[in-house]
Amino acid sequence: MNELHQRVLELLPRCVEDRRWLHRHAELSFEEHETSDYLQAALRGIGGLDISRPTPTSVMAVLRTGRPGRCLAIRADIDALPIQEENELEFRSCRAGVMHACGHDGHAAILLNAVRLLAERRERLCGELRFIFQHAEETPPGGAVEVIRAGVLEGVDEVFGLHLTSTLPTGDFGVCGGVLTSATDRFEIEITGKGGHSSMPQECVDPIVTGAQIILALQTVLSRSLRPSDAAVLSVCQANAGSAYNIIPGGMHLTGSVRSYDERVRATAERRIREISEGVAAGMGASVQVDYVRGYDSIYNDPALTDWARGLIARTFGEGAVCELSPIAPGDDFCYYDQVCPGFFLELGAANPEKGSDAPHHNARYRLDEDALAYGMEYTVALLSERCRPTE
Ligand code: NI
């Protein structure tokens, strides 16, 4: 058994303890005060790190080796979600209606304990390592743009991140070069008609009939306006109108989401949603206001870094640990880091049905398999130790 693996197993109980504390004290985006204080205190305890607060609820620790080499950054997100936890765990969230239901408690604990291990091995490292504990991933426009604006990536050569996932078993490393996640956009369609008595429709402009036709016509954006090989999802998820059975309302509001993996597809979807909504509304004598709000962009994994990481995972955990992924739907504001410098983002398996760790993310019964924390720590330490080496 190699030395790093041994140390990871020794440190695992501490990592589990950190993760459980963070889980218990779950905090929403932009409100991660206790979380960031906890992380800052723990990082201080390690010693030899420059610690700063890029924003009120984020923390960065920098390990300077004093030897020439790359400047590498790694990011963990730390926020929780507005969900009432339904798990019966002794460390269940102590905050009503707030829960770590996406595994960000695990991300923070993995990175914190990887810092502990890297600090122990600092004599063997070169260059500079930056550890970014980022707030507010769950709430666009997100914390990434704020910490980047605060300068966390200045002088950084490469950036890394990971997400635990219940779609892969513990021990699997999900790798995908190029586009990894979808761009996550939202649209709002405000239809204005003319309200009146249900028995006199000739005096009204019915926004519900208009809205119904818009909803159906939007289904053609994917089927008629995009290439068969294009991948995208368009869903109308809210349709609100009306107050009584015999009143034609004056307006209707539709809300929906678009997920895409390509700028051309994204721009086409936006344009067609506007054209269809405006055209159908005009035909019905109604007016319409369309707001298309761009969310996170796609994460782009640098192909060369991805190949390198694939090799590292195979060397460290065996060929069978590498699981080739197709692009996935959930978005992540890690996309803004890889727009500044080459990046690699990993999907780390954390599902174990035997332990009840297979509920989907953002579910009140989401539960990560804590054994995945060991894989995350070992991966992070191996990655940064090997990658920081000076290039001849
Ligand atoms: Ni997440």
Image (cartoon, rainbow, N blue to C red):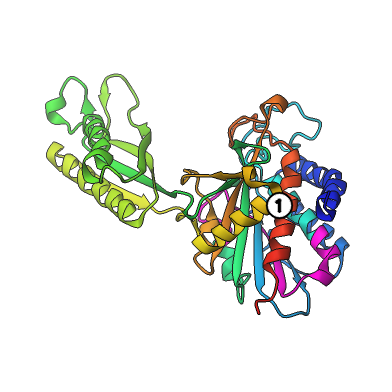
Quarter of image, res 232: top left
The one nearer the camera, 191 or 117, is 117
- Relative vertical location of residue 177 with respect to residue 24 in this rendering, above or below: below
Locate residue 126, reporting x and y percent: 74, 74
Horizontal side of residue 359 vs 219, given as left or right: right
Q: Is residue 77 visible?
A: no
The amino acid sitting under disc 1 is: Thr
Residue at screen point 77% across, 44% down: 19
Q: Quadrant of ligand 1?
A: top right
User: Considering the numbered disc 1 on the image, is that residue within a helix, a strand or a loop?
Assistant: helix
Residue pointed to by mark 1: 316
Number of other residues with Cα within 10 Å of mark 1, as a class: few under 14, some 14 to 19, many 20 or more:
some
Q: Quadrant of residue 117?
A: bottom right
Q: Residue at x 28, y 41 (%)?
A: 222
Residue 56 appears left or right of 141: right
What residue appears at the point 35 percent right and 26 percent down from the top-left corner?
Answer: 243
- Residue 39, can we see it? yes
Above or below, comparing residue 44 to residue 288 in the picture: below
Classify the position of the C terminus by image quarter. Answer: bottom right
The answer to which of 220 and 95 lies nearer the viewer is 220
Depth check: 168 or 277 in front? 168
Would you place residue 297 above or below residue 19 in this image? Answer: below
Q: What x and y, as percent, mark residue 332?
A: 53, 51
Nearer the observer, 341 or 88? 341
Q: Measuring from the top left, give residue 312's x and y in whole percent.
A: 65, 56
Indicate if the residue with disc 1 has its beta carbon within 8 Å of ligand 1: no
Residue 6 pos. (x, y %): 85, 49
Q: Residue at x 63, y 70 (%)?
A: 152
> What's the magenta region?
116-144
Does the segment drawn in magenta span residue 292? no
Q: What count of labels does the image hold?
A: 1
